[in-house]
Amino acid sequence: MNPKVDKYLIDGCMRCKFGGTPECKVNDWRLELETLRQLVLECGLTEELKWGVPCYTFEGKNILLVSAFRDYCALSFFKGSLLKDTHQLLTKPGEYSQSSRVIRFTNQERILEQQEILKTYVYESVEVEQLGTESRVQKKS
């Protein structure tokens, strides 16, 4: 476990005015974030803090983020568009997203119910990275 991520779980990302206050969105999702953190660590990824949020890497390559939002917390896969998504859990984080995909959570129970499925997504993300597969990114015109 990375002490910088411990600090994130207490203070938040500190990128907005609510960081370190009771209004920080991390406070609303702390239990879920800690559960996701443990799940991802069980998959053997390295825990870092990048862009103010927990980032999980494999052999120095970014695999996923665990982060809090106002209405949910999420696992965000950098190359999620390349995953099979056999359980139809992945969604685009935004209208113009190209390769990233997220799985949103609003309670710990769902994370616990789906933990083995979620681990398969994490392992598949590592495989995609090991194969060197690149996402097709459309250039803006």
Image: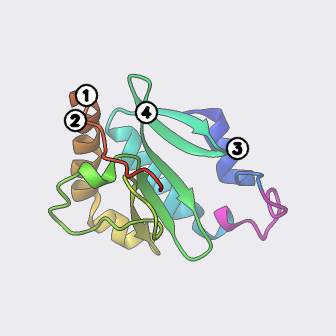
Q: Are marks 1 and 2 in contact (CB under 8 Å)?
A: yes
- The alpha-carbon separation of the residues under discs 2 and 3 comes to 30 Å
Q: Is residue 88 left or right of residue 78?
A: left
Which circle, 2 or 3, is nearer the viewer? 2
Q: Is residue 17 magenta?
A: yes
Tell me the chief SS of the magenta region. loop
Identity of the amino acid at label 2? Glu
Q: Which mark is residue 130?
A: 1
Alpha carbon separation for disc pair 4 and 3: 19 Å
Sequence order check, earlier mark of 3 and 1: 3
Q: Are marks 4 and 2 in contact (CB under 8 Å)?
A: no
**Residue 20: horizontal and vertical position, in percent?**
81, 56
User: Which residue lies under the disc numbered 4?
Assistant: 57
Question: Which amino acid type corresponds to the residue marked 3 in the rendered image?
Answer: Lys
Residue that label 2 marks:
127
Q: Are marks 1 and 4 in contact (CB under 8 Å)?
A: no
The image's mark for residue 28 is none
- Amino acid type, mark 1: Gln
Asked whether, in this view, residue 11 is left or right of residue 129, the answer is right
State the residue at coordinates (47%, 56%).
141
The image quarter containing residue 28 is bottom right
Disc 3 crowd rating (10 Å Cα; few below 14, some 14-19, many 20+) is few
For residue 125: magenta? no
* Residue 69 point in image, percent of width and height: 59, 67
